[in-house]
Amino acid sequence: MLGIVIPLKSEVTSSCWENTSRSLIATLKSVLNQNEKSYQVIVVGHERPLGLDNLNLNIDVFYSVSGEIPPPPKVNATQEQFTSDKNSKISKGIELLKQRYPNINVWFALDADDLVEENLVRVALKALPYSLFSLDMGYMYYGHANRVIETQELTQYCGSTGIIHDDYLSFDVQGKLVSCPFLSQSHMGLSRYFKQQPNSKVKTSNRPLVMYSLGHGENISDGYRNWVQNVIATIKPYVKGKALSAELKKSFGINEDEF
């Protein structure tokens, strides 16, 4: 079984909570769109996202860490603070899912604005055994432009690109997560890390299974661009990309009103 943990940024650090919530709902819909149902999902954040109750889920997939973990500051938050916040939420999500579903044997940390293809769970489970299943192939998704750029180097850009076997996570006797490669390694360094581990097995997906969402104003990188970089980022999907087909929309659970 695949455990999917989705860390959600706080409303405090969101430039637009409505957009953040809308992106999260799109992410969840892509998960719910899976053909294989052998997975469990949890969203960990501070404030409950808008629109979540409209999904009419059988169980509440949201857990609030308000009172447990302070959010990054509203002004001048550093990259380290954002990373610490994200890692704390991933850790809490893994602990909660492990307690509820001890038969989870592979883990996926999915960013709250990225989308997964309808066969991701099936492909990830069928590919076992492995230490790391690397999702190198995927799409750069520009929802505002309704365009995508296909890439075979998604791990260089996107955090939602590694599925890790439970053997590489360790917990203490109280069930608290002690170590996990999601927390100690960057998405760019996961494959290298696992290849250095004795007796590890790294497999790579041979089909695009993730869409890395861009252009909605909530990526951390959006705050670091100058005006020239912003212009380049704006025209890039039109120069290098292609229109999002109806088939792709269906396979990633995309609805027109979500971005």
Image: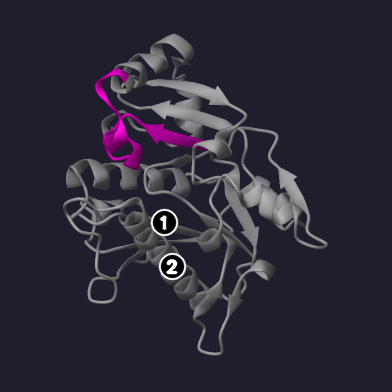
Q: Is 230 in front, or is 146?
A: 230
Residue 180: percent from the left, percent from the top?
Answer: 57, 67
**Residue 8 versus residue 235: which sits nearer the camera?**
235
Image-based side of 162 in relation to 228, left or right: right
Contact between marks 1 and 2 (CB within 8 A): the answer is yes
Amino acid type of the residue tagged 2 in the rendering? Gly
Q: Residue at x 33, y 55 (%)?
A: 82
Q: Which residue is mark 2?
A: 93
Q: Residue furthest bottom?
A: 173
* Helix, strand or loop for disc 1: strand
**Local SS, label 2:** helix
**Can residue 39 be seen here?**
no
Looking at the image, which residue is at 50% across and 46% down? 160
* 130 sits left or right of 245 in the view: right
> Above or below — where is 82 with respect to 60?
above
Q: Is residue 44 magenta?
A: no
Count all numbered tags in the image, as a single digit.
2
Seen at 66% across and 67% down, the residue is 168
Judging by the rendered image, the residue that carries numbered circle 1 is 6
Of residue 192 and residue 176, the one placed in the foreground of this image is: 192
Q: Earlier in the sequence, mark 1 or mark 2?
A: 1
Which amino acid type corresponds to the residue marked 1 in the rendered image?
Ile
Q: Find the magenta span and give its range.
A: 210-228
